[in-house]
């Protein structure tokens, strides 16, 4: 009986990595999905832990760093957000994508009052793939103008306008990451 249990335990140990690595049940996918759920619930510390696990499991992909940077931005924790954005940009340097890191970089730059560089990053993000990124960035700009602009509203050059735009851009980014198109 003990030999049978030992053989069964050995079989489970041999096969468990095979089953764990299959399809949507992979550890990286689980970490990503868990992190997104924690982000959706505003449980930022736990989301950071999940996205850190995701990054450790898939360090060659930019997506974990984008998601973690997004969470840091939501927490208004700029230094780690900028580090993750830089890592994502480094990974995407050899790819045609990179809209996500540029989008997040634009948000971070807006918060730091570097409006010209932020506009360039957001324009690069909007021109990248997928086109929905450009649509969402444009929508955030329109919503900011609707909320604060107008004939007697807040000037686009004001701090209030810049921070509201950063907030709405981040909300659009999170919505895009959590719910897709």
Image: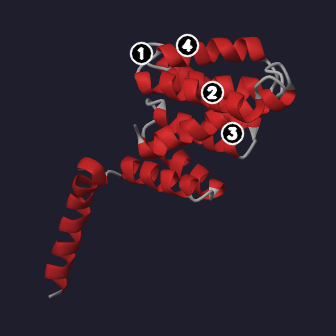
Q: Hey, which quadrant is residue 90 in on the image?
A: top right
Q: Position of residue 91 (x, y in %)?
A: 49, 22
SS for tag 4? helix
Q: Nearer the viewer, residue 159 or 30?
A: 159
Q: Nearer the viewer, mark 1 or mark 4?
A: 4
Q: Are marks 2 and 3 in contact (CB under 8 Å)?
A: no
**Which residue is identified by label 4?**
124
- The mark found on residue 73 in the picture is 3
Q: Hey, which quadrant is residue 60 in on the image?
A: top left
Sequence order check, earlier mark of 2 and 3: 3
Sequence order check, earlier mark of 2 and 4: 4
Q: Is residue 176 above or below residue 11?
A: above
**Which residue is identified by label 2?**
142
Q: Nearer the viewer, mark 1 or mark 2?
A: 2
SS for tag 2? helix
Rounded to the nearest angstrom, the CA distance separating label 2 from label 3 is: 21 Å
Q: Nearer the viewer, residue 151 or 104?
A: 151
The structure residue drawn at horizontal position 64% and vertical position 54%, both measured from the top left corner, is 44
| Number of residues whose C-alpha sits closer than 10 Å to that of mark 2, classed few (under 14), some (14–19) or many (20 or more) | some
């Amino acid at each position: 009986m003990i030999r049978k249990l030992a053989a069964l335990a050995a079989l489970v140990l041999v096969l468990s990595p095979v089953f764990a690595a299959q399809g949507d049940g992979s550890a990286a996918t689980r970490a990503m999905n868990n992190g997104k759920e924690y982000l959706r619930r505003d449980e930022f510390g736990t989301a950071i832990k999940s996205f850190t696990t995701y990054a450790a499991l898939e360090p060659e992909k930019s997506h974990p760093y984008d998601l973690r940077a997004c969470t840091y931005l939501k927490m208004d924790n700029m230094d780690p957000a900028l580090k993750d954005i830089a890592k994502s940009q480094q990974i995407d340097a050899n790819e045609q994508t990179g809209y996500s890191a540029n989008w997040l970089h634009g948000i971070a730059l807006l918060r730091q009052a570097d409006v010209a560089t932020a506009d360039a990053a957001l324009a690069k993000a909007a021109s990248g793939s997928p086109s929905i990124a450009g649509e969402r960035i444009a929508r955030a700009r329109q919503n900011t103008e609707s909320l604060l602009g107008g004939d007697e509203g807040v000037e686009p050059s004001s701090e209030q306008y810049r921070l509201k735009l950063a907030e709405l851009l981040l909300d659009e980014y999170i919505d895009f990451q959590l719910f897709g198109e």
